[in-house]
Image: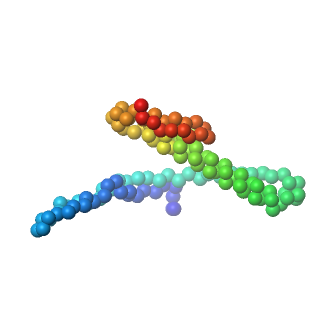
Amino acid sequence: MASDSSYGAVPTSDVVVYAPGSGTQPTESSPGFKNVGLNAKKMMTLTAIDSEVTEDMAIAIGEVVGRSIVRAFARNEDKMGFLGDGTSTYFGFIGIGQALLNVDSSIANIMGIVVQGSAGAWSAITKT
């Protein structure tokens, strides 16, 4: 990717399927598209390890630290994906919970979407 931002089209609807009778033409249809943007964010970690630990267990400590980094990234990605509210706590990401709360007000009023969850635990999305 040449820059941190990229834009492209994604489908919003499919073509319509018809079963016309003999000698009848189907109505023309075409798929719908909308433009979306991607703003890439770089995430990283800096890990310091005591030199005595690396001397005692050089191979094992690499695996331990590597697994720790993988778990930390996965945990943060899950938090951003589910609980992200656009604040710096979630690196500006808006997760599915907040996205559902931001649904058009007429739909939210009809369905009464309630999102329940807390840090590290996801429970339910319910209608009231």
For this view, does 95 lie left or right of residue 63?
left
Give the residue at x 14% y 64%.
21
Q: Position of residue 41 (x, y in %)?
A: 56, 51
Please, which residue is most extreme toward the left here?
A: 23
Residue 87 found in image quarter: top right
Is residue 92 among what the camera can see?
A: no
Q: Residue drawn 46% across and 57% down? A: 6
Q: Residue 6, can we see it?
A: yes
Residue that appears at 53% across and 53% down: 40
Give how far across and how far down residue 80 sits, in percent: 56, 45
Relative image position of residue 5 (x, y in whole percent): 48, 55
Residue at 37%, 35% in the rendered image: 111
Give left or right: position of 62 versus 81: right
- Name the foreground residue: 110 vs 6: 110
Instruction: Choose between 40 and 53: the one closer to the eye.
Output: 53
Image position of 105 with respect to 27: above or below:
above
